[in-house]
Image (tube, rainbow, N blue to C red):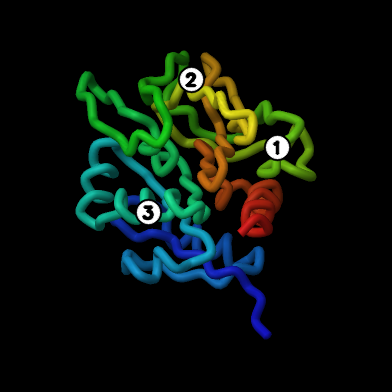
Amino acid sequence: MDTKKKVVVFDYGFGNVRSAERALAHVGADVEITRDFDTAMNADGLLVPGVGAFSACMEGLRKARGEWVIGRRLAGGRPVMGICVGMQILFERGIEHGVETEGLDEWPGTVGPLKADIVPHMGWNTVEAPEESQLFAGLDPEARYYFVHSYAAHDWSLEVTNAKIRAPRVTWATHGERFVAAVENGALWATQFHPEKSGDAGAQLLTNWIETL
């Protein structure tokens, strides 16, 4: 019997879908690239990539009904993972070149420019993951991940007051300033870096996600 987890890479025109597909298949997932609503809704996991501008990604996502797919999956506790700008659009808003764009508002906060001597932040960097992280389980704290971005979420303000609900686990990185590098929040996980370009560490991270599906 085939026990592979079915993962859909959501194809809305903004993201390294082929790289994500190869990386997920490499770690044992049954992967399909599609924007088909029913297929995306019924998969064990939905991966939302993203490259380019926040506003362009949001426009493409809305045209593909992606915000509805993501919202419906999360309402039913179905796993979703965002990567790079696919993580940024999960926040309340993004500001690029003075233009403010409404995000998916799954998390409060604003994605804005990185304040650093060298931008974009391009290359390998370490992260500060919480000890109880499932996403980074089994990974060396000194492991490096591949980043390429000029914008980031600099603050985390979502508070959980219900003791029965597990508080989000937030991972940080630093490039000029501290920023959110990854989030584990119930069925919704995301990374600012590219696990599909992060070698063995990225493969282990994707394996950790698939094992929760």
Alpha carbon separation for disc pair 1 and 2: 18 Å
Mark 1–mark 3 contact, CB under 8 Å?
no
Q: Which residue carries the number 1 mark?
A: 133
Q: Is residue 209 left or right of residue 38?
A: right
- Mark 3 residue element: helix
What mark, if any, has residue 180 been given in the picture?
A: none
Residue 40, image quadrant: bottom left
Image coords of residue 178 (percent x, y): 55, 17
Tag in front: 3 or 2: 3
Q: Nearer the viewer, residue 129 or 145?
A: 129
Alpha carbon separation for disc pair 3 and 2: 23 Å
Task: Give the vertical position of 142 relative to 68 (above or below).
Answer: above
Density class for disc 2 (Cα within 10 Å; few <14, some 14-19, many ≥20) is: few
* Residue at the image point whose x is 58% and y is 29% from the top: 162
On-image quarter of the N terminus: bottom right
Q: Mark 3 or mark 2, which has the lower sequence index? A: 3
* Residue at the image point whose x is 30% and y is 52% from the top: 68
Image coords of residue 70 (percent x, y): 38, 51
On-image quarter of the C terminus: bottom right
Q: Nearer the viewer, residue 170 or 24?
A: 170
Image coords of residue 23 (percent x, y): 57, 60
Q: Mark 1 or mark 3, which has the lower sequence index? A: 3
Q: Amino acid at mark 2?
A: Ser
Task: Give the vertical position of 64 relative to 128 (above or below).
Answer: below
Alpha carbon separation for disc pair 1 and 3: 25 Å
Q: Which residue carries the number 3 mark?
A: 72
- Mark 1 residue element: loop
Q: Which residue carries the number 2 mark?
A: 157
Task: Give the vertical position of 174 relative to 6 (above or below).
Answer: above
Q: Mark 1 or mark 2, which has the lower sequence index? A: 1
Q: Is residue 151 left or right of residue 123?
A: left
